[in-house]
Amino acid sequence: VDDVVGIVTFRDLQRVPFTQRETVFVKDVMNPIVETIDVEDDVSEALKKLQGSTSGRLLVVENDRVVGIISRTDIVRALQILSVREET
C-alpha cells in the first residue's frame, strides 16, 4: 500500500474545466489521503471509516496489497439489497 500516492474519482476529473483537461495532470486533482480497509473487516467498520472519508472510497487491502476498492455507494446498495431480501 505504500506505493499508492493518491486516489482520483470521476467527480475529481469532472471538476477540471474541459479546456484544461489536456494540460492538468492527475497528480494535480488526486486526493493524496488514501484510506484503506482490510478484507477481513466488517461492513460496520467500513461505514465508520467512510463517514469521515474525503473521497468516499476505501482501498481494500490484503497482506499490504491492494485487492479492490469499495465506495460508500457500494455499501448502501448492498445494504438495500439485503434489506429487500430479508423482507421477502
Image: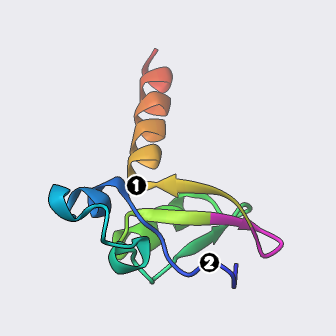
Could you classify mark 1 by the number of other residues whose Cα lies within 10 Å: few (under 14), some (14-19), or many (20 or more)?
Answer: some
Q: Mark 2 — residue?
A: 4
Q: Is residue 65 left or right of residue 46?
A: right
Instruction: Kindly identify the amino acid type of the residue bearing the numbered disc 2.
Output: Val
Q: Is residue 83 above or below residue 30?
A: above
Q: Is residue 18 above or below residue 63?
A: above
Residue 18 in which image quadrant: bottom left
Could you classify mark 2 by the number of other residues whose Cα lies within 10 Å: few (under 14), some (14-19), or many (20 or more)?
Answer: few
Secondary structure of the residue carrying tag 1 is helix
Which residue does the image show at 59% across and 73% down from the upper left? 36
Residue 57 in which image quadrant: bottom left
The magenta-colored residue range is 60-65
- Disc 2, disc 1: CB below 8 Å? no
Q: Mark 1 — residue?
A: 72
Position in image of residue 8 (x %, y %):
42, 65
Instruction: Kindly identify the amino acid type of the residue bearing the numbered disc 1.
Output: Arg
